[in-house]
Image (cartoon, rainbow, N blue to C red):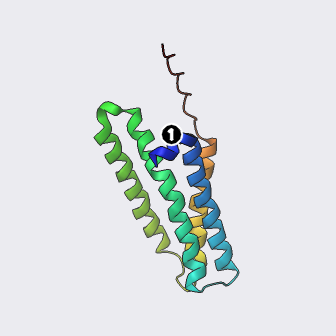
Amino acid sequence: MSRYAYRIGVQRMLAAGIAIQAAAALTGWGFATAGLWHPFWLFAPWAVIGFGQGLALPTLTANAVSLAPQHAGTASGLLGFSQQMVGALSVQAMSLASTANPIAVTAFVAAGSVFGLGAFWLGPKPAPAPPAPAAG
């Protein structure tokens, strides 16, 4: 991941991961609403969601830790705790939904992914990195 982040840039890597995740979640919701409930149609989008998260989460963690390098453990722990809390609250919210078909869970994941994409695009942008000093 670090090689790709260095090559294409941290923000582009994060944007790609979040966009892939949102597109896959919307595709999974589309499959579910179309009545495609075979395990392949349910789990294939989740594999792509996992790929998108694999691009985004390490980059996000590195960004969080870089904001407070003297407190890297605290920053990483707070981020991990926040992810676990959102996951736990999401599970509790999903327990109120119907389990008769996969439409509710796929809609919930799609809505969360689109919300995350919107937060990324509408949220504050990091300051550009200062130019590297000239060699010589």
Residue underneath mark 1: 6
Q: Quadrant of residue 92?
A: bottom left
Residue 82, compared with residue 33, is above or below; it is above
Locate residue 82 relative to residue 73 in the image: left or right. right
x%, y% of residue 6?
Answer: 50, 39
**Seen in the image, is 44 located left or right of residue 78?**
right
Q: Residue at x 45, y 40 (%)?
A: 63
Give above or below for 22 relative to 11. Answer: below
x 42%, y 42%: residue: 62
Tell which residue pokes out farthest to the front in this image: 136
Q: Is residue 64 above or below residue 134?
A: below
The image position of residue 111, as x and y in percent, is 60, 62
Is 129 on the left-hand or right-hand side of 58?
A: right
| Residue 122 image offset from top left, x and y in percent | 63, 42
Residue type for callout 1: Tyr
Outermost residue on the top side: it is 136
